[in-house]
Image (spheres, rainbow, N blue to C red):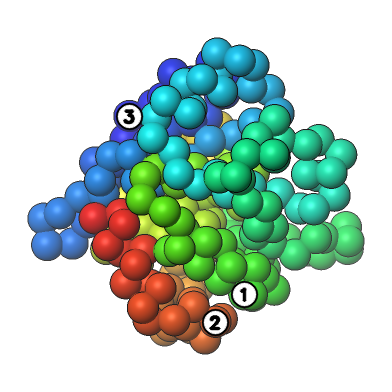
Amino acid sequence: MPRLRWPDLCNARDLGGIATSGGGQIRERSLVRTDNHGRLEPAGLTAMRSYGVSRIIDLRWTWEALKYPSPLAADDRYRLVPACFDPTGDEDIPSDSYRLMVDASKDRLAAALITIAEAPPGAVVLHCHAGRDRTGLVVALALRIAGASVDTIAADYALSKGSTPVTMVNTLNHLETGYGGVANYLIDSGVTPAQLAAVQARLT
Protein backbone atom coordinates (compact mmCIF):
# COMPACT_ATOMS: atom_id res chain seq x y z
CA MET A 1 0.00 0.00 0.00
CA PRO A 2 2.40 2.68 -1.15
CA ARG A 3 2.01 6.14 0.30
CA LEU A 4 1.80 8.69 -2.47
CA ARG A 5 3.92 11.80 -2.22
CA TRP A 6 1.37 14.10 -3.72
CA PRO A 7 2.23 17.60 -2.49
CA ASP A 8 -0.28 19.20 -0.11
CA LEU A 9 -2.06 15.91 0.73
CA CYS A 10 -1.49 14.25 4.10
CA ASN A 11 -3.35 10.97 3.63
CA ALA A 12 -2.88 9.75 0.06
CA ARG A 13 -2.14 6.12 -0.70
CA ASP A 14 -2.53 3.68 -3.54
CA LEU A 15 -4.31 0.53 -2.36
CA GLY A 16 -2.33 -1.63 -4.76
CA GLY A 17 -0.68 -4.64 -3.18
CA ILE A 18 -3.40 -5.42 -0.63
CA ALA A 19 -3.83 -9.19 -0.51
CA THR A 20 -7.07 -10.77 -1.75
CA SER A 21 -8.47 -14.28 -1.57
CA GLY A 22 -6.88 -16.96 -3.71
CA GLY A 23 -3.42 -15.45 -3.52
CA GLY A 24 -4.22 -12.34 -5.55
CA GLN A 25 -3.81 -8.68 -4.75
CA ILE A 26 -5.27 -5.27 -5.54
CA ARG A 27 -3.74 -3.79 -8.67
CA GLU A 28 -1.72 -0.61 -8.33
CA ARG A 29 -3.26 2.48 -9.91
CA SER A 30 -6.75 1.04 -9.67
CA LEU A 31 -7.98 2.60 -6.41
CA VAL A 32 -6.42 5.52 -4.54
CA ARG A 33 -7.64 7.16 -1.33
CA THR A 34 -6.79 10.71 -0.28
CA ASP A 35 -7.84 13.51 1.99
CA ASN A 36 -9.43 16.81 0.93
CA HIS A 37 -8.28 18.20 -2.41
CA GLY A 38 -8.92 21.78 -1.34
CA ARG A 39 -5.28 22.10 -0.27
CA LEU A 40 -3.89 21.05 -3.64
CA GLU A 41 -1.56 23.52 -5.28
CA PRO A 42 -0.30 23.22 -8.90
CA ALA A 43 2.40 20.67 -8.01
CA GLY A 44 -0.11 18.38 -6.31
CA LEU A 45 -2.60 18.69 -9.15
CA THR A 46 0.13 17.82 -11.63
CA ALA A 47 1.15 14.76 -9.60
CA MET A 48 -2.42 13.51 -9.51
CA ARG A 49 -3.09 14.11 -13.19
CA SER A 50 0.13 12.34 -14.17
CA TYR A 51 -0.87 9.21 -12.22
CA GLY A 52 -3.33 8.02 -14.83
CA VAL A 53 -6.43 9.10 -12.92
CA SER A 54 -9.66 8.47 -14.81
CA ARG A 55 -12.21 9.33 -12.13
CA ILE A 56 -12.19 11.54 -9.04
CA ILE A 57 -15.00 10.78 -6.60
CA ASP A 58 -15.70 13.44 -3.99
CA LEU A 59 -17.61 11.78 -1.13
CA ARG A 60 -18.30 14.98 0.82
CA TRP A 61 -21.74 16.36 1.47
CA THR A 62 -23.10 18.78 -1.11
CA TRP A 63 -22.86 21.75 1.23
CA GLU A 64 -19.17 20.98 1.87
CA ALA A 65 -18.42 20.88 -1.83
CA LEU A 66 -20.22 24.20 -2.35
CA LYS A 67 -18.55 25.93 0.60
CA TYR A 68 -15.12 24.42 -0.06
CA PRO A 69 -15.10 23.64 -3.79
CA SER A 70 -12.65 21.14 -5.19
CA PRO A 71 -10.00 22.64 -7.50
CA LEU A 72 -10.94 19.75 -9.79
CA ALA A 73 -14.68 20.42 -9.82
CA ALA A 74 -14.59 21.59 -13.44
CA ASP A 75 -12.57 18.57 -14.57
CA ASP A 76 -14.62 16.07 -16.59
CA ARG A 77 -13.20 13.28 -14.43
CA TYR A 78 -14.74 14.75 -11.25
CA ARG A 79 -17.94 13.43 -9.68
CA LEU A 80 -19.60 14.60 -6.45
CA VAL A 81 -21.17 11.52 -4.86
CA PRO A 82 -22.05 12.22 -1.19
CA ALA A 83 -21.40 8.91 0.54
CA CYS A 84 -23.45 9.30 3.70
CA PHE A 85 -26.46 11.01 5.14
CA ASP A 86 -26.01 14.60 6.26
CA PRO A 87 -26.16 14.39 10.08
CA THR A 88 -28.38 16.76 12.04
CA GLY A 89 -26.22 16.58 15.14
CA ASP A 90 -28.75 14.54 17.10
CA GLU A 91 -27.44 11.12 16.09
CA ASP A 92 -25.69 8.95 18.62
CA ILE A 93 -22.91 7.82 16.27
CA PRO A 94 -20.86 5.09 17.95
CA SER A 95 -17.15 5.78 18.04
CA ASP A 96 -16.22 2.14 17.45
CA SER A 97 -18.31 1.46 14.34
CA TYR A 98 -19.84 3.04 11.22
CA ARG A 99 -23.00 1.02 11.81
CA LEU A 100 -25.25 4.09 11.68
CA MET A 101 -23.71 5.26 8.40
CA VAL A 102 -24.19 1.79 6.92
CA ASP A 103 -27.83 1.55 8.00
CA ALA A 104 -28.87 5.10 7.04
CA SER A 105 -26.91 5.63 3.82
CA LYS A 106 -27.61 2.55 1.70
CA ASP A 107 -28.53 4.42 -1.48
CA ARG A 108 -25.58 6.80 -1.18
CA LEU A 109 -23.02 4.10 -0.53
CA ALA A 110 -24.49 2.13 -3.42
CA ALA A 111 -24.09 5.19 -5.67
CA ALA A 112 -20.42 5.46 -4.71
CA LEU A 113 -19.77 1.81 -5.61
CA ILE A 114 -21.65 2.20 -8.89
CA THR A 115 -19.49 5.21 -9.74
CA ILE A 116 -16.38 3.10 -9.18
CA ALA A 117 -17.83 0.29 -11.30
CA GLU A 118 -18.66 2.60 -14.20
CA ALA A 119 -15.45 4.64 -14.22
CA PRO A 120 -13.30 4.61 -17.36
CA PRO A 121 -10.07 2.57 -17.33
CA GLY A 122 -7.46 4.11 -15.05
CA ALA A 123 -7.05 5.00 -11.39
CA VAL A 124 -10.12 5.96 -9.34
CA VAL A 125 -9.41 8.49 -6.59
CA LEU A 126 -11.75 8.63 -3.58
CA HIS A 127 -11.71 11.42 -1.02
CA CYS A 128 -13.83 13.17 1.58
CA HIS A 129 -12.47 15.71 4.08
CA ALA A 130 -9.82 13.87 6.10
CA GLY A 131 -9.91 10.74 3.93
CA ARG A 132 -10.77 8.61 6.95
CA ASP A 133 -14.47 8.02 7.69
CA ARG A 134 -16.50 8.25 4.48
CA THR A 135 -13.51 7.37 2.32
CA GLY A 136 -12.60 4.54 4.67
CA LEU A 137 -16.08 3.07 4.51
CA VAL A 138 -16.37 3.18 0.72
CA VAL A 139 -12.86 1.78 0.33
CA ALA A 140 -13.74 -1.04 2.74
CA LEU A 141 -16.82 -1.98 0.71
CA ALA A 142 -14.85 -1.99 -2.53
CA LEU A 143 -11.97 -4.00 -1.06
CA ARG A 144 -14.34 -6.57 0.43
CA ILE A 145 -15.98 -7.05 -2.97
CA ALA A 146 -12.51 -7.52 -4.44
CA GLY A 147 -11.78 -10.30 -1.94
CA ALA A 148 -9.71 -8.59 0.75
CA SER A 149 -10.08 -9.96 4.27
CA VAL A 150 -11.65 -8.05 7.15
CA ASP A 151 -8.34 -7.87 9.01
CA THR A 152 -6.47 -6.60 5.94
CA ILE A 153 -9.08 -3.92 5.29
CA ALA A 154 -8.98 -2.87 8.96
CA ALA A 155 -5.19 -2.64 8.84
CA ASP A 156 -5.35 -0.28 5.86
CA TYR A 157 -8.07 1.80 7.54
CA ALA A 158 -5.86 2.17 10.63
CA LEU A 159 -3.13 3.86 8.58
CA SER A 160 -5.24 7.03 8.59
CA LYS A 161 -4.58 9.34 11.52
CA GLY A 162 -7.05 8.87 14.36
CA SER A 163 -8.21 5.45 13.19
CA THR A 164 -8.15 2.10 14.98
CA PRO A 165 -8.72 -1.30 13.33
CA VAL A 166 -11.58 -2.24 15.65
CA THR A 167 -13.84 0.42 14.12
CA MET A 168 -13.67 -1.18 10.69
CA VAL A 169 -13.77 -4.73 12.05
CA ASN A 170 -16.98 -3.89 13.92
CA THR A 171 -18.46 -2.22 10.84
CA LEU A 172 -17.75 -5.17 8.56
CA ASN A 173 -19.03 -7.60 11.20
CA HIS A 174 -22.25 -5.57 11.34
CA LEU A 175 -22.58 -5.90 7.56
CA GLU A 176 -22.07 -9.65 7.88
CA THR A 177 -24.51 -10.25 10.71
CA GLY A 178 -27.10 -7.66 9.71
CA TYR A 179 -27.13 -8.06 5.94
CA GLY A 180 -25.41 -11.32 5.11
CA GLY A 181 -22.23 -9.65 3.92
CA VAL A 182 -21.11 -6.69 1.84
CA ALA A 183 -22.27 -8.09 -1.50
CA ASN A 184 -25.81 -8.74 -0.21
CA TYR A 185 -25.91 -5.30 1.43
CA LEU A 186 -24.93 -3.56 -1.81
CA ILE A 187 -27.28 -5.59 -3.99
CA ASP A 188 -30.15 -4.85 -1.60
CA SER A 189 -29.13 -1.18 -1.83
CA GLY A 190 -29.34 -1.05 -5.64
CA VAL A 191 -25.98 -2.24 -6.98
CA THR A 192 -26.33 -4.94 -9.63
CA PRO A 193 -24.29 -8.15 -9.63
CA ALA A 194 -22.72 -6.97 -12.90
CA GLN A 195 -21.60 -3.75 -11.23
CA LEU A 196 -20.09 -5.69 -8.32
CA ALA A 197 -18.25 -7.85 -10.84
CA ALA A 198 -16.98 -4.67 -12.53
CA VAL A 199 -15.59 -3.38 -9.22
CA GLN A 200 -13.84 -6.69 -8.62
CA ALA A 201 -12.41 -6.77 -12.14
CA ARG A 202 -11.17 -3.20 -11.87
CA LEU A 203 -9.38 -3.78 -8.59
CA THR A 204 -7.90 -7.21 -9.30
**Percent of width and height locating residue 155:** 37, 44
Identify which residue is drawn at 38% across, 35% down.
52
Instruction: Give the SS element for disc 1.
Output: helix
> Which sits in the foreground, 178 or 11?
11
Does label 1 or label 2 sit earlier along the sequence? 1
Front label number (1 vs 2): 2
**Can the viewer see residue 170?**
no
Q: Give the alpha-carbon distance from disc 1 to disc 2, as whole Å.
A: 8 Å
Q: Against 18, is 130 above or below?
A: above
- How many C-alpha atoms fall within 10 Å of the one at disc 3: few (<14), some, or many (≥20)? few
Q: Is residue 7 above or below residue 169?
A: above
Left or right: where 198 falls relative to 20: right
Nearest the camera: 15 or 152?
Answer: 15
Tag 1 near tag 2, CB within 8 Å: yes
| Quadrant of the image containing the C terminus | bottom left
Q: Residue, x 33% and y 39% (percent of image)?
A: 29
Which residue, given by chain and number where applicable, does mark 2 sit on?
A: 190
Given the image, on which type of amino acid does mark 3 rest? Answer: Pro
Q: Amino acid at mark 2?
A: Gly
Dividing the picture into quadrants, the one containing residue 53 is top left
Relative image position of residue 5 (x, y in whole percent): 44, 18
Check residue 56 in the rendering and tell me which mark sits there, or answer none.
Answer: none
Compared with 165, 94 (above or below) is below
